[in-house]
Image (tube, rainbow, N blue to C red):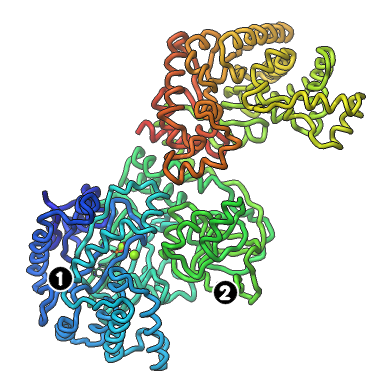
Amino acid sequence: AKYVYFFGDGKAEGSAEMKNLLGGKGANLAEMTAIGLPVPAGFTISTEVCTEFYKNDRQYPAGLTHEVASNLKMVEDLMGKKFGDPANPLLVSVRSGARASMPGMMDTILNLGLNDTTVQGIIAQSGDERFAYDAYRRFVQMYSDVVMGMDKEALEHILEHKKEDRGVRLDTDLTAEDWKELVGKFKTKIRETLGQEFPEDPQEQLWGAIGAVFGSWMNARAITYRRLNNIPADWGTAVNVQSMVFGNMGNDCATGVAFTRDPSTGENYFYGEYLVNAQGEDVVAGIRTPQPINKAKKKDGDLPAMEDVMPDCYQQLVNIRSILEKHYKDMQDIEFTIEKGKLYMLQTRNGKRTAKAAIKIAVDMEKEGLIDERTAVLRVAPSQLDQLLHPSLDPKAEKKVIAKGLPASPGAASGEVIFNADEAEAAAKLGLKVILVRVETSPEDIHGMHAAQGILTARGGMTSHAAVVARGMGKCCVAGCGDIKVNYAANQFTDRNGNIVKKGDIITLDGSTGEVILGMVPTVSPELTGDFGTLMEWVDRFRRLKVRANADNPHDSKVAREFGAQGIGLCRTEHMFFEADRIAAVREMILSEDLEGRQRALAKILPMQKGDFVGIFREMKGLPVTIRLLDPPLHEFLPQEEKDIESLAKTMGVSIQALKSKVEFLHEFNPMLGHRGCRLGLTFPEIYDMQVQAIMEAACELVKDEGFTIVPEIMIPLVAVVDELKRLRENAIRICEDVIARYGVKVDYLIGTMIELPRAALTADEIATEAEFFSFGTNDLTQTTFGLSRDDAGKFLPFYVETGLLEEDPFVSLDQNGVGLLVKMGCEKGRSTRPEIKLGICGEHGGDPASVIFCHKVGLDYVSCSPFRVPIARLAAAHAVL
Ligand code: ADP
Ligand code: MG
Ligand code: MG
């Protein structure tokens, strides 16, 4: 087997297609080399080595040593240097790189190959002793941290001490002699702490670093990141060994990171940051404030742009930007270094972006002819839309801005201030909304960022860890907020006016403007036109699956239509019963001792129900509306509090005792499996009769007076046996025909059922003989298939997901292998006896992208979800086709 892939001098054994084998970084280094971009030569050890390494008890496969040696030789020949050579030493970086980019998860080691001998060679080559010792001490710091497990702080401490001693503030103020001395001190400290020598032998250094990269695949941060992002452990990481170029050899050197378009807004302009005379991750580490690359968006107070400071290099970079975009046909996130005026590319990958940017870039690139509509639609992940569909701060709201930072990831969020990731996680588990406030974040904070509503950092730029990770998570983030001073010890920060904000105080972040606001601020609905509208037009052209919304009132119906719903898939009638002016009549109906009493109460409810349906039908302008007849157990409507029972007894003119015993009588031990759904309709037919009458009168009235075309879909819940449906359907038809005759208009209607019990799915062929449509109620179907109470599952289901017993919460994403089979069977059996039957799904799953794709595959006609998720479902339905 081949384990190592070479790249250099315009030729590469790998390519961008080989991400699985070479990791994202290695594959793209190869690709950039092959298309003629300036990439320092090197080689990639494949992910297969990582997998075998773990399979064979941390042993490398035979032959690896030899392949590494021969590839290193090729690099040496190309560079005209030799690894470990005292006079003309080659230095390399050792870089990890998995298939999926895992920001900050694994550590890169720079300047490897330095020791007390080779450093002399570097001094001779560069003629710069200070540079050489600075590189050396960086290497000792990085290597001892990543490979040897040395405490970083201990060496930082020695460095700080040195600066104090010398009376200087910045690293750049230290001299060659200082750095040289520090290298010695570092090594001594390492020996004292670890009881181990810092390795002098470059070969030992190289293999130590390679081992550390493979080892880091199983470190706690990497494992957490993989769990949060569903990355399998057996993918493995690759290792890239690459000859060093130096951004820290003087003022004609620099290092930087950039995005070919703005990752926050998607605007087509070159966005990035760089630092003169710096190395590696200095830009993202937040030690010195980076300077902008481009002057177009430079703001007052920003440091001079690269465009002005290094115009030649800037031009090289601009050319590469356009080569990369034309080649990859997507926005790129790049890392580069300039050594003595010459530009080198060190990384490119498809850039992470906000949902807003994803849409703008996709639509723009289609217009620029780089991609077609199909690709544009595929460029936006359905789940990502969630970000955009959420409210942003109400522009008219009063707000007390207490600080301003960088708008690092858009959206708005309010919550209690918390300063530590563990506490943020604990608070979120209790259901609190929190804002994580940190000086800066690191990979150790990921779980806290995940738990928080938003993230605020005092330091770091738009490409800092906090910013990149927050954008990936779709969380709002304000980064680099120099206005605030964080004091972890006191659990507080001071704002720009010196006022104190304590742990637990509420703040609001606006990730689109960078504002930090004291207290809670109201929000407004998102913008659905422009690029969003264009993309959704394409989406609708591709998809087959229709998308409806769950809505119970005219307002939600309107929102649903604005979000592109093609009808209502679930209108729950019980919500209507809870309104203050009706609940009394509903209770009266439930508590009546006889039919007459119930009918008297129902007569009061009828006009109100009719009014509800008129409002909804009118709002939906003739689009289909599925109305579910009363479903929950009756006791849900009853008063439980003593004083409510008393006052109800008074209005009904019965004794408190009588009412109490009635309430007790209606109590159920297992109400979700109790007297609900069609079981109510069968035992109290007058309830459903009233509802059907209200639906049909509303429809007939609108058809007659307002010229609408309406085909109401009347849905009967919780059917297990075909005869339940048969009897209720006969009743419903009788009422419908009666109303139609009274109004003297022609109105079609459909009568169908929910499939939400396993027995219904199993006998769907029989049930379909009485049903013109099915709607799979996958919430209840999941509950009854798993035998798992939705209301109690919160106590143990998270454990199941965390420990891998279940891949996902089956109430969030449809259990395709179990519950999904019942859905599939229900569809097939239903169609076998009624080929034209309409099939849909309602419930949370209708807005979950993976479940939507499943629904497309099993051939449903539509999904129905909450209004805010309609665009997500539309996009997922298009992805299902493409
Ligand atoms: P990450 O995956 O965390 O981005 P990288 O492997 O990209 O880590 O390394 C981080 C940084 O180190 C790069 O952005 C670059 O600035 C620097 N670097 C890596 N390899 C080299 C090299 N061969 N020459 C110069 N700088 C390098
Ligand atoms: Mg890193
Ligand atoms: Mg990188």
Quarter where residue 696 is shown: top right
Label count reads 2
Residue 19 in view of the camera: yes
Q: Residue at x 72, y 25 (%)?
A: 634
Counting from the top left corner in percent of width and height, residue 425 is at 53, 56
* Residues at marks 1 and 2, CA–CA distance in whole angstroms: 44 Å
Residues at marks 1 and 2 touching, judged by CB atoms closer than 8 Å: no
Q: Nearer the viewer, residue 190 or 414?
A: 190
Q: In what quadrant does ligand 3 lie?
A: bottom left
Tell me the amino acid under the disc marked 1: Gln
- Where 48 falls versus 753 (above or below)? below
- Where 179 falls versus 365 (above or below)? below
Q: Nearer the viewer, residue 6 or 161?
A: 161
Q: Quadrant of the C terminus?
A: top left
User: Which mark, by number, is residue 629?
Assistant: none
Left-right relation of 823 to 604: left
Q: Which residue is mark 1?
A: 203
Residue count near mark 1 (Cα–Cα under 10 Å), binned few <14, some 14–19, many ≥20: some
Q: Nearer the viewer, residue 488 or 797?
A: 797
| Mark with earlier residue (1, 2) | 1
Quarter where residue 711 is shown: top right
Instruction: Give the structural element (helix, strand or loop) at label 1.
Output: helix
Tell me the amino acid under the disc marked 2: Ala
Q: Which residue is mark 2?
A: 489
The residue most toward the bottom is 166
Left-right relation of 386 to 543: right
Counting from the top left corner in percent of width and height, residue 810 is at 48, 35
